[in-house]
Image (cartoon, rainbow, N blue to C red):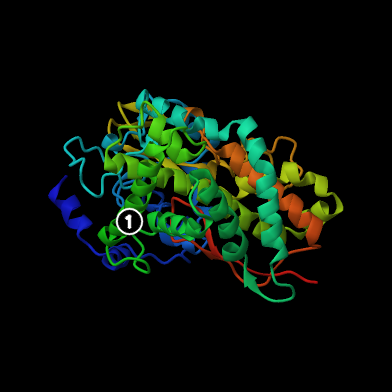
């Protein structure tokens, strides 16, 4: 690590935010293209990111940002180039020692692997480690097992919806999106339902490590994450003693050949991966769907007239929301892409959120259409060996929830402005004020 990088890490979250503060209302067309920095979290928090990606797709789809709070990085913004990067893991590494999947990660083979900040996980690995560890938890998400969960999801969704207030404002995110995904997380880990809010808190912590509204420094956030290790280490010890392996994620990790001897850092890393992965895609798509239907009332009318469109609408919601805005890779060798030379060890960012609006690949990509002919043509779950292992579960939860919503409510009305996460990784909604007439 260079002296400059070392100094940067010592800045508080507030100092970092102040150093790289921007005016989100500036027209991106007025910014010299070489200065465009689409990864700035303020653009996502203000929901001002769309014209940045539109310009990059049109003028510079493989774009180098030299200076950002994350350091230099390449933005890949069109559908085909993203597919190329995602499907060529030999050229573009996810390994944590090569920089991992987040913007700020840089190759560092000399890192202290016992450091509280070093959290390996299978999504931040390349084959064969990635493949071996992913196989351990894959049985949780088979069609047969998901079918067993379906009625449980339906029952819980029904109870959540039946307890919602009528004719008064409430936050849909907290009352529905967080509640349903929290209950499912507790089920997948087989921990008490009353502990589900701890899981949500740790998921929120991961996404707010650099947010001064949550933590003064990232180190404080990591200290909170290690409380997650303490909790799940106790669960691990219980599962080790079981005579018959349970059908839950911790039991699978306990008995998996490639996971049963994980070091504490790797154990915590994989737990956090499963928590965030099991929470954020579904949670933010649940919220994003209600918002999208209200922003496109003709589509809401279409759904009301034909509730059978739910199964087509769900993948369209996931495309439209793009709950994981990006995944990053590190070039393992010099690669030419889009007429640009990406050099070995450069950081490369696949903007799924932009590829999902690429009109050269998706017809009317900037329109929300609940009865698309090919609704599953999107990048929200990634592509290739790193495609989201829980994508079927996410879709099933959304399908069941919307089936139950349509049985109960004529309409869910958004009655105020949404508040978005300050994150360029998770494209999420913190607050969505709604009212249910009746």
What residue is shown at x 16% (from left), y 37% (from top)? 110
For residue 311, say whether it is visible.
yes
- Determine whether, in the image, residue 263 is placed left or right of residue 366: left
Q: In this view, does 335 lie above or below 21?
A: above
- Percent across and percent down for residue 249 are 47, 39
The crowding category of the residue bearing disc 1, from other C-alpha atoms within 10 Å (few below 14, some 14 to 19, many at least 20), is some
Can you give x and y, in whole percent of width and height, for residue 207 in the image?
Answer: 41, 55
Q: Toward which corner of the image does residue 225 lie, by quadrant?
A: bottom left
Q: How many labels does the image show?
A: 1
In this rendered view, identify the residue nearer to me: 151 or 100: 151
- Specify whether residue 58 is in view: no
Residue lying furthest left in this view?
3
* Residue 241, image x, y percentages: 38, 38
Q: Is residue 343 above or below residue 414?
A: above
Q: Nearer the viewer, residue 198 or 434?
A: 198
Question: Can you say which quadrant of the picture contains the C terminus?
Answer: bottom right
Decide if residue 414 is on the left or right side of residue 111.
right
Q: Which residue lies furthest to the front in this view?
A: 243
Q: In this view, does 386 lie above or below 319?
A: above
Secondary structure found at label 1: helix
Residue 417: name its quadrant.
bottom right
Residue found at x 49% / y 41%: 77
Circle 1 residue? 227
- Horizontally, residue 116 falls left or right of residue 292, namely left
- Foreground residue, 435 or 133? 133
The answer to whether residue 336 is above or below residue 414 is above
Horizontal side of 365 relative to 302 (left or right) equals: left
Residue extending furthest toward the right: 305
Where in the figure is residue 354, as x and y percent of width and height?
53, 45
Q: Could you tell me which residue is drawn at 61 percent across and 46 percent down?
A: 318
State the quadrant of the N terminus.
top left
């Amino acid at each position: 690590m260079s002296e400059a990088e070392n100094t940067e890490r010592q800045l508080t979250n507030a100092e970092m935010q102040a150093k790289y503060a921007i005016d989100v209302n500036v027209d991106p067309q007025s910014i010299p293209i070489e200065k465009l920095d689409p990864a700035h979290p303020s653009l996502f928090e203000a929901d001002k990111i769309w014209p940045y990606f539109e310009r990059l797709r049109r003028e510079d789809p493989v774009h180098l940002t030299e200076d950002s709070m994350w350091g230099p990085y390449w933005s890949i913004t069109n559908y085909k180039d993203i597919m190329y990067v995602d499907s060529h893991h030999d050229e573009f590494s996810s390994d944590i020692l090569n920089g991992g999947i987040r913007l700020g990660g840089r190759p560092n083979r000399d890192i202290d692997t016992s450091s509280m900040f070093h959290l390996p996980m299978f999504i931040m690995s390349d084959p064969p480690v990635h493949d071996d560890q992913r196989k351990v938890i894959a049985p949780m998400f088979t069609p047969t097992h998901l079918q067993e969960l379906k009625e449980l999801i339906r029952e819980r969704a029904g109870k959540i919806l039946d307890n919602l207030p009528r004719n008064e404002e409430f936050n849909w995110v907290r009352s529905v999106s967080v509640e349903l995904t929290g209950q499912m997380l507790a089920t997948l880990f087989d921990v008490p339902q009353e502990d589900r809010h701890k899981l949500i808190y740790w998921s929120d912590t991961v996404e707010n490590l650099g947010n001064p509204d949550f933590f003064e420094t990232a180190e404080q956030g990591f200290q909170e994450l290690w409380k997650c290790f303490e909790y799940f280490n106790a669960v691990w010890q219980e599962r080790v003693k079981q005579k018959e392996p349970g059908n839950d994620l911790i039991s699978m990790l306990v008995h998996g050949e490639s996971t049963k001897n994980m070091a504490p850092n790797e154990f915590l890393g994989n737990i956090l991966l499963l928590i965030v992965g099991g929470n954020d895609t579904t949670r933010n798509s649940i919220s994003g769907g209600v918002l999208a239907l209200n922003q496109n009332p003709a589509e809401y009318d279409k759904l009301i007239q034909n509730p059978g469109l739910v199964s087509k609408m769900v993948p369209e919601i996931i495309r439209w929301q793009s709950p994981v805005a990006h995944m990053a890779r590190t070039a393992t060798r010099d690669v030419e892409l889009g007429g640009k030379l990406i050099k070995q060890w450069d950081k490369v960012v696949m903007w799924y959120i932009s590829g999902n609006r690429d009109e050269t690949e998706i017809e009317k990509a900037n329109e929300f259409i609940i009865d698309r002919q090919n609704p599953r043509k999107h990048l929200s779950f990634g592509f290739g060996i790193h495609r989201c292992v829980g994508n079927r579960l996410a879709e099933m939860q959304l399908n069941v929830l919307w089936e139950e919503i349509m049985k109960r409510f004529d309409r869910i009305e958004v009655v105020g402005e949404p508040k978005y996460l300050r994150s360029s990784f998770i494209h999420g909604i913190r607050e969505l004020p709604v009212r249910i007439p009746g």
